[in-house]
Image (cartoon, rainbow, N blue to C red):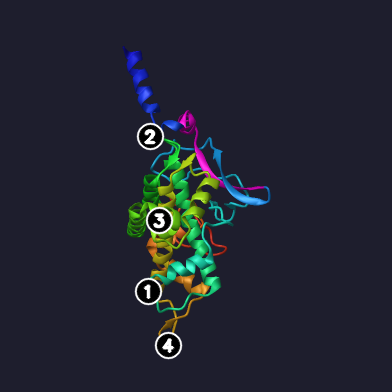
Amino acid sequence: MARSSKSAARTLEDLTLDSGYGGAADSFRSSSASLCCSDAHGANYWHLTDSMHSRHNSLDTVNTVLVEDAEILECTVQCAKLPELEDVPWSLGEVASALSRDEERSLATPPQDVLLRLSVLVSRALVRVAKEAQRLSLRYAKCTKYEIQSATKIALSWSVSMNCIGAALGALSMYNMSTDEDKFGRGKSVRCGLVFNVGKFFRWMVDSRVAVRIHEHAAIYLAACMESLFREVYARVLRSALLERDNGIPKFTVETLEQAVSSEAEIWGSLQPWQHLICGKNANAGPPHPGMPFTCPDR
């Protein structure tokens, strides 16, 4: 009888939401995975690597796996750093168009170097959300909107994540309300009311191997969240008192952008390159200065 109950429990555990998985879900549950960057065929891409140092995907920490790479490990501060993405699923033109949809429409587009630096900062948040979504997708080997939603809540601060999720819900609602005629006449981004290309995000998630299967709603959620995050950071920079103004028009420079981000506790940690930071800033995790020792605080 005991053997029969154990067999039934195992059978229920192996059931997945998608009958087409086969044994993929079980093989993914038996191993731990992390996103890391490597060179292949002359281009950088992310892939899954097995780790013997995982903590069984516990929720009390994010990415406890340290990548054994001299370029990623910062020797001076003894803290692992996130990989810098060379290929992001958006362009600077799309970022400028997304920012122009903000309430401050009368403002001029920030300079190219500011847009580039802003893209680098937000790409770090994209890495954090993708790593969390990958960890949450291990159970069923599939990434859906729920994994993206939970990963956004974990990686970003509460207020920022709620704004991003609200934008994602609005985009998905518009997509679901589109008619059958729109499927052939308009792209997914237009049907979602987004500037960022949903197809690029879907391809990026596939190439990054976030999960064995990527649902299209997950790509919509991630694109909407990142577009909303760009607007959120941009709005906080505009409200910063450190931003110099010339005849009432803000003067954007890379330095003022960095100072404005550093003064915002809710977005500072998510935009930093260190893996152990998530969101918020405290006395134990301040921005390190060159030549000054930096200790990793326990989360």
Query: What span is in magenta?
Result: 21-40
**Circle 3 or circle 4, nearest the eye:** 3
**Element at label 4:** loop
Q: Which amino acid does label 2 sit on?
A: Leu
Query: Label 2 vs label 4: CA separation?
Result: 58 Å
For marks 1 and 3, the one nearer the N-term is: 3
User: Residue reaching furthest top?
Assistant: 1
Question: Which residue is disc 3 drawn over?
Answer: 182
Crowdedness near tag 1: few (<14), some (14–19) or many (≥20) residues, C-alpha within 10 Å: few
Q: Residue 17 carries which label?
A: 2
Magenta stretch contains residue 23: yes
**Circle 2 or circle 1, nearest the eye:** 2
Q: Is residue 232 above or below residue 278?
A: below
Point 41% across, 34% down: residue: 18
Task: Name the spot of residue 296 as percent of width and height, x first.
Answer: 48, 52
Query: Label 4 vs label 1: CA separation?
Result: 16 Å
Task: Name the spot of residue 271 as percent of width and height, x first.
Answer: 46, 60
Question: Which residue is disc 4 drawn over?
Answer: 247
Task: Name the spot of residue 166 as percent of width and height, x first.
Answer: 32, 57
For marks 2 and 4, the one nearer the N-term is: 2
Question: Which residue is disc 1 drawn over?
Answer: 239
Q: Which amino acid does label 4 sit on?
A: Asn
**Element at label 1:** loop
